Image (cartoon, helix red, strand yellow):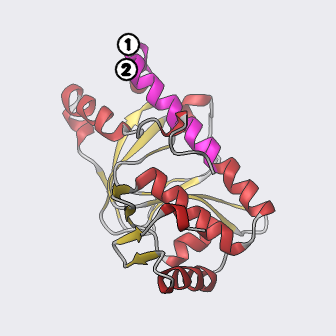
Amino acid sequence: MDNPSSLWYFENVDLYNVLCPHLVREDQSKSSPNVYSKNDYIYFPNELSDSIYLIAKGRVKIGSFTEKGNEIVKSILGEGDVFGELALTGEEKRGDYAQAMDENTQICTMDINHLQNLMLNNKPLTLKIYKLIGLRVRKLERRIESMVFKDARTRVVDFLKELAVERGKKVGFETMIRNHFTHKDIASLTGTSRQTVTTVLNELKDKNIINFNRRQILIRDMSILK
């Protein structure tokens, strides 16, 4: 796993709070989020890639289906996250789907042309956008490597480490993570079973390496999480 002090983790990519002021200031109508019910699709594969999306509330699953109809979950995003950013790389049509995972999921939508105009005169914004894309690509690369070379338990542990680096807050030796992943979500993202995830998390909890509930995960000491 990458060192948390490396370039990729120099700062959080907080595009939501960067872009939302533009939406409010330049077009009041765009500042009102679209509301989706649980399991509603925000976009489907092969739809035009002409917008970028910001999550104001709830969770969104990004995934695709194999030719045999098997689902591949690529990421699960929460409040403040951005998705659909591949439209900026020249993607003409969506290669995946985006689906609301919670009731009352609220999504702000920004037209790609609008965003590109903002980027022309805002180098910090441009850097954040491309950093986000780089992070997503690197995460997918790590996930593929993990699926090929690591056992199920290690994949779950690595997921916790990555979550701690990206979303955790340090409190002394401990790291607190606001958790919006169910055991089923973690299983989908690590290519394991729900039972395996439950077994690994309970094992770590019994050893007092972590503690968790539905809202948060507490890692006692990152150096002993293995």
Q: Main secondary structure of the magenta part?
A: helix
Q: Quadrant of the C terminus?
A: bottom right
Q: Position of residue 10 (x, y in %)?
A: 46, 35
User: Which secondary structure lies at badge 1?
Assistant: loop
Comparing 149 with 143, the one in front is 149
Q: Is residue 4 visible?
A: yes
Disc sitting over residue 121 in the figure: 1
Residue type, numbered disc 1: Asn
Which residue corresponds to the image point at 60% horizontal and 58% vertical from the top-left?
A: 63
Reply above or below: 119 against 128.
above
Which residue is located at x 46 percent, y 80 percent? 208
| Secondary structure state at the residue bearing disc 2 | helix
Which residue reaches farthest top? 121
Q: Quadrant of residue 92?
A: top right
Q: Which residues are magenta?
A: 116-139
From the viewer's side, name the closer residue of 180 and 157: 157
- Above or below, 84 against 170 in this view is above
Residue 43, disc: none
Q: Quadrant of residue 137?
A: top right
Q: Amino acid at mark 2?
A: Leu
* Residue 108 picture location, percent across and down: 33, 44
Residue that label 2 marks: 118
* Figure quadrant of residue 29: top left
